[in-house]
Image (cartoon, grey):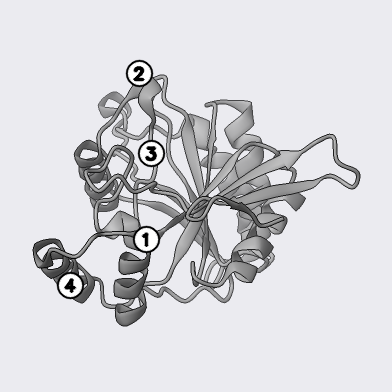
Amino acid sequence: MSSQDDDTGKDGSFGAEHLAAESMAADMDPWVVFDARKTPRAEFEEWLQTYQPSRVSRFGNPERNAEPVGWIAVYGPSFCPERGDVVGLQEDWERLQTSGRHITFDTIKELALNRHVLTGKWLMHLDTGFKVDHAWCGIARAVLDGRIGVAKVSPCCPESERKQVICVYTDDFTNEEQVLIADAIIRATGVKCLLSYKPDVYTYLGIYRDNRWHLCPTIYESKFDLECIPRRSRITNKVNNTEVT
């Protein structure tokens, strides 16, 4: 499961190298985790209220003896971490960059399949406060119920105007049906904002916005259609620019 995925755009522009550094920093700092595999369900609601994303500071509070927090996460009852061979993937990536081959989504997908690094996540960016707290409650409960395997949310940065990000994971970014099912589960919790889907292989290889290979760091985009009856997501494959649903 990869780390920081707040692909901030031109508005608050952060380059790929900056985001990769943030990714490593967030992973190294402590996480606040509710692990449904070993923590009694009866403790969940209190945990959820105690660690509301808008009230947990990314960089802690020395005056209150509070440490920095990298992420807030919920592991589902059947969650099984699956990273594949990330070290081998990164070695293959170094060789690919010096091979002279044109780097595309398909060449990176080939690396990911060879090393079984197939996890990915739907990303949603929300304003700090009620919006992120409300969305996170719905997502976290879906994880507790086993409808989602694992999800995480970034803590707030009080001195920053950047939005907070929620990540909902799937096991295989090459399995389009699985990706679409995850979108439907997210929408069923009441989330209506724009969603973007990113393979973890991109994160492990440092492929964020404004990367030097000119790759879009997300491969699906989901817009909730409020005017359609019944309401549903309109999902676009951003690799080939085709509408999936």
Q: Which mark is residue 92?
A: 4
Disc on the earlier residue, 3 or 4: 3
Disc on the earlier residue, 3 or 2: 3
Q: Residue 7 carries which label?
A: 3
Q: Distance between the residues labelled 3 and 2?
A: 18 Å
Q: Residue 76 carries which label?
A: none
Crowd around label 3: few <14 · some 14–19 · many ≥20 (10 Å): many
Disc on the earlier residue, 1 or 2: 1
Residue 107's place in the image compared with 121, above or below, is below
Residue shown at 65%/50% (left/top)? 235
- Secondary structure of residue under mark 3: loop
Disc on the earlier residue, 2 or 4: 4
Residue shown at 63%/30% (left/top)? 131
The three-letter code of the residue at mark 1 reads Phe
Question: Marks 4 and 2: in contact by CB < 8 Å?
Answer: no
Crowd around label 2: few <14 · some 14–19 · many ≥20 (10 Å): few
Q: Distance between the residues labelled 3 and 1?
A: 18 Å
Mark 3 or 4, closer to the camera: 4
Mark 2 or 4, closer to the camera: 4
Residue shown at 91%/44% (left/top)? 229
Give the residue at mark 1. Answer: 105
Query: How many marks on residues?
Result: 4
Which quadrant of the figure contains the N terminus?
bottom left
Q: Residue 159 carries which label?
A: 2
x then y, percent, for residue 37:
54, 73
Quick check: 207 left or right of 146?
left
